[in-house]
Amino acid sequence: MTDPEPARPLVGQVVTVFRNRLREPAREAYAVELEVVSELARSMPGFVETKTFVADDGERATIVTFADADAHRAWRDHPRHREAQRHGISDYYTEYSIAVGTTSYASTFARPDATS
């Protein structure tokens, strides 16, 4: 069985880049809430994908993609997501930044013999 084809960037998709640093005492509670909120995002109409990366210096970057502005807005304004945002400010983060943009150009490349 082959893996499903990964989501490809498409013009019009809305991409959020969320950069943050966690407070050390909050890591466990954050992980629990992250699981809940991530599952919620995946269930939202128009959800495309989310991925999180952690840099060597501890900064985290999460990239979240929705199909269009309406889907992104629904996620941004969802009451449970808003609650998690409040928890982030009060409990989880030492700092964060958010950048949101609409994809105006998209291109992909996949090597046909992806084994090398």
Image (spheres, grey):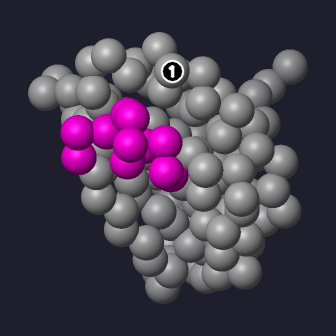
Q: Residue at x 60, y 22 (%)?
A: 32
Q: Taking 97 as reference, is 16 left or right?
A: right
Residue 91 sits in which quadrant?
top left
From which residue to which does the magenta span run?
85-95
Residue 72 in view, yes or no: yes
Q: Which residue is mark 1?
A: 29
Q: Position of residue 105 (x, y in %)?
A: 47, 80
- Taking depth in this image into account, of 39 and 46 the one nearest to the observer is 39
Is 79 colored magenta in this rendering? no
Mark 1 falls on what kind of element? helix
Is 86 colored magenta in this rendering? yes
Q: Quadrant of the C terminus?
A: top left
- Which secondary structure class fits the magenta region best? helix
Residue 44 sits in which quadrant?
bottom right
The 10 Å Cα crowd at callout 1, few under 14, some 14 to 19, many 20 or more, is: few
Q: Position of residue 47 (x, y in %)?
A: 73, 57
Outermost left residue: 57
- Taking depth in this image into account, of 17 and 82 the one nearest to the observer is 82
Residue 60 in view, yes or no: no
Q: Residue at x 28, y 51 (%)?
A: 96
Q: Is residue 53 above or below residue 82?
A: above
Q: Is residue 4 above or below residue 56?
A: below
Residue type for callout 1: Ala
Q: Position of residue 14 (x, y in %)?
A: 56, 72
